[in-house]
Image (cartoon, rainbow, N blue to C red):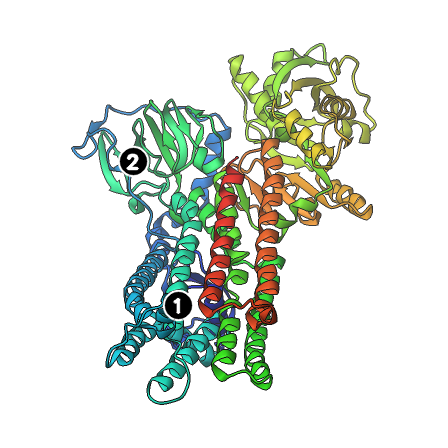
Amino acid sequence: MTHTYIISGMTCEHCVQKVKKALETIPGIQTAEVSLDPPQARVTMHHHIPESQMNESLAQVGDYRLEPAPTDHDQHHTFSQSDQTGISEKAEHRHEDHGGHQPHGGTPEKISGASAHEGGHAGHGHNPSHGEIGHDHHRMMIEDFKKRFWVSLVLTVPILILAPMIQEWLGVNWQFPGSKYLLFALSSIVYFYGGWPFIKGFFEEVRSKAPGMMTLIAMAISVAYFYSVATTFGLPGESFYWELATLIVIMLLGHWIEMKSVLGASKALELLVSMMPAEAHRVDGDQIVDVKLEDLLSGDTILVKPGEKVPADGVVVEGESYLNESMLTGESKPVRKGTSDQVIGGSINGNGSLRVKVEHTGKDSYLNKVITMVQEAQKSKSKMQNLSNRAAKWLTYIALAVGFGTLILWLLLGYDFVFALERMVTVMVISCPHALGLAIPLVVAISTAVSAQHGLLIRNRTAFEEARKISVLVFDKTGTLTQGKFGVTRYESLQKELDKKEMLRLAGALEQNSEHPIAVGIVQKIKELGISIPEADDFEAITGKGVQATVEGKSMKIVSPGYLRDEKIDIPEGAYSSAAETVVFVLIDGAPAGYVALADEIRPESAAAIKTFKDNNIKVFMATGDNEVVGKAVSEELGLDGYYAEVLPHQKVEIVKELQAKKEFVAMTGDGVNDAPALAQADVGIAVGSGTDVAAETADIILVNSNPKDIANLILFGKATYRKMIQNLAWATGYNAIAIPLAVGILYPWGFILSPAVGAVFMSLSTVIVAINAQLLKRQIGN
């Protein structure tokens, strides 16, 4: 069993590792996937573990606490009734969608008082799920750091004025009886109040035996403070009070800015969460009743007014309008929706009114699945992040070793204790692994959430990061490079006693329940001709080659040219007149009875996408179930590097293996169902054209639309994300490689020395630069 919990108290990636380790040491817990943004844990357990037991374990490693996430507790209860409506209702919806669902009339609605106002509650509100409680806690912590920063800053001003070293630099003497005790008192407040988050963090890290950033900062400020106290009360030497105060102020400022950056990384995800309205207008007979979103059930009919947000996924049963789905699918143009068209909860209605039959609500809705998928992608650890975490851990040990080594070295060289202590404090401050710990998580949080807004759903982060390596891209033709909307161009009977319309009528019986683009095109043509479609019995698919059934006592098949060749049946003359046409053949009682020719137009975006691939040195191949003539025509028109025609789904796996054997890094696009084996075999599996079905388990990345431009964007996004990760890692490691020797005092013989305060500035700047650089990814992806 798996449960999701909100975790409070986490402030950095080091906290994430401590919480994960604490949870996974509890007997009965298999895995714990923990994320900072949103602050959650997804815990898989053999048997139920009480929250009290988990909180006891967390309390031992820090000030952390967990509670069930709303999606894991409330929604599972709220939507249990709709879940129980069962598969049969969903099957009914599918039957209506593909069997020609007709709009049913309704009595004129009586608008309730609440819904009579334009742009009522149904257009506003938000969904409190998916970590918002954790984000509120994060905001409270930001406010706490902000308050501690300002208080400490105000107290630091008189500390600087009273510091003997500062007065000496300024050439003044403002000492008075008791001034050193006032300096001690002010510095004590700054140490215990301003430095408390770091001191508390130090004890938590020691208790969990996982030293990190807080250990380094706490040791630096504590050594400076207690040594200064000792000099105040009699020990010979100079105090560190002003360095201590400025160090704490700068560290608080750095943490404040960094935490705001972490929270900013989640804004794209929060925007998705906030897209759902709080209420819906449910149609109850001739009444329109405003109900809360959680009270909607599958099968309800709702009214969506002009300008409002669609409250749930469903099918239009009445009305026509244009919907803005840009924040959900990345489609910039408003999409026309009419009877029998699917709508997505969270999209914004245009100028028309729609009546929608609800299909999916709550955790089953498209938007909730997208948000969950984004969160899981953010929580999962890729190769790059594991590398970053290991580097940050080792940097902590190196900083501690170098810090104490520096103290001992300068003392052995004959320098006084104050100088040696200052060098040690500077080393520990300047080498804090914060920038290294944030280098990857911030980029991940931004890239996964913003990509989702563009219709790119990342399930496997490692695959997404490795999109830059793609050398070969294998496309499925239908609906990706082409429109996927087949229109009948010709149809002929091959038997004198069979009228061609009669042949088409019988063919419609087999195709009316299929979702395949060819079947949809044939059924659409039959409807245009006003022909009634008979029922089919004993329906059965012929894998990769067609369908068969019994219609009015006749054994019928609709098959591909490959089936005719396998059965040694000659392809009729005149069946092919255009290279761009796809032809299917109708067999009655085993004999050819007719054929239907359809054409599928190449997408206008395909040529530009192919150019983008070639500009990025990616070879493009096409694997299609269509015949050789059609495959060659499409390949030549788009300038592909090659094509495979009349390919069955299982043969695509062999194509991928063949290319991989040539040392190619292969990306495969497919529909996520028929092409599941090939998607799993490919180095990067891309499920395309999934629409509102985002459960393609074998795909690494899911594209909501089938647009090849989205696949080009995916590769460009992956490259941009990887560049940002490398930039951040290079900055964080390069900074430490230069800063640590300077902090040790390697240039001291030439008169250059870093003070602890300057070291703190450099450390904070390195963290802020990493955070800002990660935020720039939003602009790059947006462009």
Q: Residue 578, image x and y in percent?
A: 73, 14
Quarter of the figure with residue 250: bottom left
The label on residue 123 is 2
The disc, 1 or 2, on the residue closer to the chain's N-terminal end is 2
The label on residue 719 is none
Q: Is residue 72 left or right of residue 703?
A: left
Task: Identify which residue, 130 or 358, lies in the foreground.
Answer: 130
Q: Is residue 692 left or right of residue 263?
A: right
Graded by Cα atoms within 10 Å as few (under 14), some (14 to 19) or many (20 or more), the crowding at tag 1 reads few
Amino acid found under the numbered disc labelled 2? Gly
Amino acid found under the numbered disc labelled 1? Trp
Q: Residue 86, image x and y in percent?
A: 43, 47
Residue 60 seen in the current view = no
For disc 1, the marked residue is: 169
Q: In percent of the image, x 60 and y 83: which residue is there?
A: 413
Q: Is residue 224 left or right of residue 384?
A: left
Task: Identify which residue, 454 or 728, lies in the foreground.
Answer: 728
Graded by Cα atoms within 10 Å as few (under 14), some (14 to 19) or many (20 or more), the crowding at tag 2 reads many
Number of the front mark, 1 or 2: 1
Q: Residue 720, image x and y in percent?
A: 59, 44
Q: Residue 102, image x and y in percent?
A: 41, 24
Quarter of the figure with residue 354: top left
Q: In percent of the image, x 24 and y 34: which residue is there?
A: 120
Q: Label 2 near label 1: C-beta < 8 Å?
A: no
